[in-house]
Image (spheres, rainbow, N blue to C red):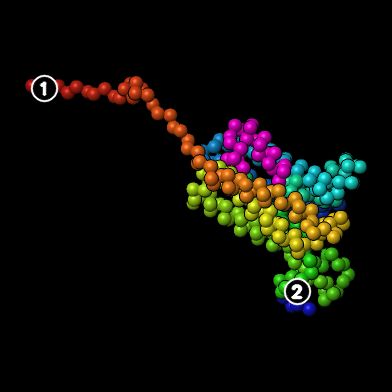
């Protein structure tokens, strides 16, 4: 038995009142969305955008995230069930099933709709969401840890976790150590958030529309692709696949992210034109000189 192993026996239920449960995972989702909304409001205030831009973006992107995550899971991982019984997309949500790739598609749609509604650049919104998404994703991955889900393969590494709730009534020494892949992803996403925020605050790359958004796509889905190699499969049909569904779904986002970064870096940096006042206007604006008379 490895004495350094973490024995993880965390109760996923935060509150249970008369059979009504609130889970830590749900709380993490709420915190992730609130942190995202606060950060977007910060960007708007810092750059002189009206508060309505933040409110509109929050509404559309929250809806896109939740709907996209649920529909994405149903279509990508269990299509045979939900195509046969589509009402379970809604009624079966208590049984779990949210997909980050579907959430990303929903976020992209939310960005497009909110930008049109607020009449701001889609790239401006996307770049700011590119900074926000990693920290929100890190918080949600902590929720997965509280649920003892999305676990890794067995490991002999000293930091392995013993997920006791997956092995009820087993003695501690018999429970295998596994990679805490939720923590691996959370650490990657938090690091990405710090890097992108520093790029936004202290470099000129933030002025190249789309660069931060592209970097976010690569920074989120490349680690996801790699970490999937040490995760257990989520669904039965992934058994025997060289790349699992999460990896196949990550590839397009990585390629799009690289393409957007290259395009943003190579394109001529847009310069905002400032209207120059006309010569006549300058003459009108000039104050009349006062005449001074000598008193004798």
Image quadrant where one finds the N terminus: bottom right
Q: Which quarter of the picture shows residue 175?
A: bottom right
x and y, in percent, of residue 21 in the image: 82, 52
In the displayed structure image, the side of residue 143 where residue 21 appears, left or right: right
Quick check: 252 left or right of 245?
A: left
Residue 120: x %, y % from top left: 58, 34
Q: In the rendered view, tell whether residue 149 sits above or below residue 62.
A: below
Above or below: residue 186 compared with residue 118: below
Q: Position of residue 113 (x, y in %)?
A: 67, 35
Mark 1 vs 2: CB contact within 8 A: no
| Residue visible at 72% across and 40% down in the picture | 63
Q: Which residue is mark 2?
A: 156
Quick check: 231 left or right of 58? right
Query: Is residue 56 at least partly visible in the picture?
Result: no
**Residue 212, label in figure:** none
Callout 2: few (<14), some (14-19), or many (20+) C-alpha neighbours within 10 Å? few
Q: Give the main secondary structure, helix, strand or loop, of the magenta stretch.
A: helix
Residue in the image at 14% along x and 21% along y: 293
Residue in the foreground of this view, choosing between 182 and 226: 226
Element under label 1? loop
Question: Can I make out residue 205 in this image?
Answer: yes
Residue range corresponding to the magenta coloring: 104-126
Q: Which mark is residue 295?
A: 1
């Amino acid at each position: 038995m490895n004495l350094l192993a973490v024995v993880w026996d965390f109760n996923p239920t935060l509150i249970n009142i008369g059979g009504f449960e609130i889970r830590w995972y749900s709380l993490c989702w709420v915190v992730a969305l609130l942190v995202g909304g606060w950060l977007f409001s910060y960007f708007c205030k810092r750059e002189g955008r009206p508060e309505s831009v933040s409110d509109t973006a929050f509404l559309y992107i929250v809806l896109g995230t939740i709907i996209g995550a649920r529909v994405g899971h149903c279509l990508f991982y269990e299509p045979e069930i939900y195509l046969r019984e589509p009402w379970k997309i809604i009624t079966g949500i208590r049984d779990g099933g949210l997909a980050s790739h579907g959430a990303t598609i929903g976020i992209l749609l939310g960005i497009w709709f909110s930008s049109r509604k607020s009449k701001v650049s889609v790239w401006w919104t996307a770049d700011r969401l590119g900074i926000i998404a990693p920290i929100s994703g890190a918080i949600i991955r902590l929720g997965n840890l509280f649920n003892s889900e999305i676990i890794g393969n067995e490991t002999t590494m000293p930091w392995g976790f013993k997920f006791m709730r997956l092995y009820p009534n087993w003695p501690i020494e018999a429970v295998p150590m596994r990679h805490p892949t939720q923590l691996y992803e959370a650490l990657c996403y938090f690091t990405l958030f710090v890097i992108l925020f520093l790029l936004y605050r202290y470099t000129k790359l933030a002025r190249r529309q789309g660069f931060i958004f592209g970097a976010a796509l690569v920074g989120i889905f490349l680690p996801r692709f790699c970490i999937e190699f040490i995760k257990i499969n989520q669904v039965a049909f992934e058994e025997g696949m060289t790349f699992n569904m999460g990896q196949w779904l990550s590839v397009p986002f990585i390629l799009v992210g690289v393409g957007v970064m290259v395009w943003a870096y190579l394109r001529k940096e847009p310069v905002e034109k400032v209207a120059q006042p006309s010569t006549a206007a300058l003459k009108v604006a000039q104050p009349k000189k006062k005449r001074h008379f000598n008193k004798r």
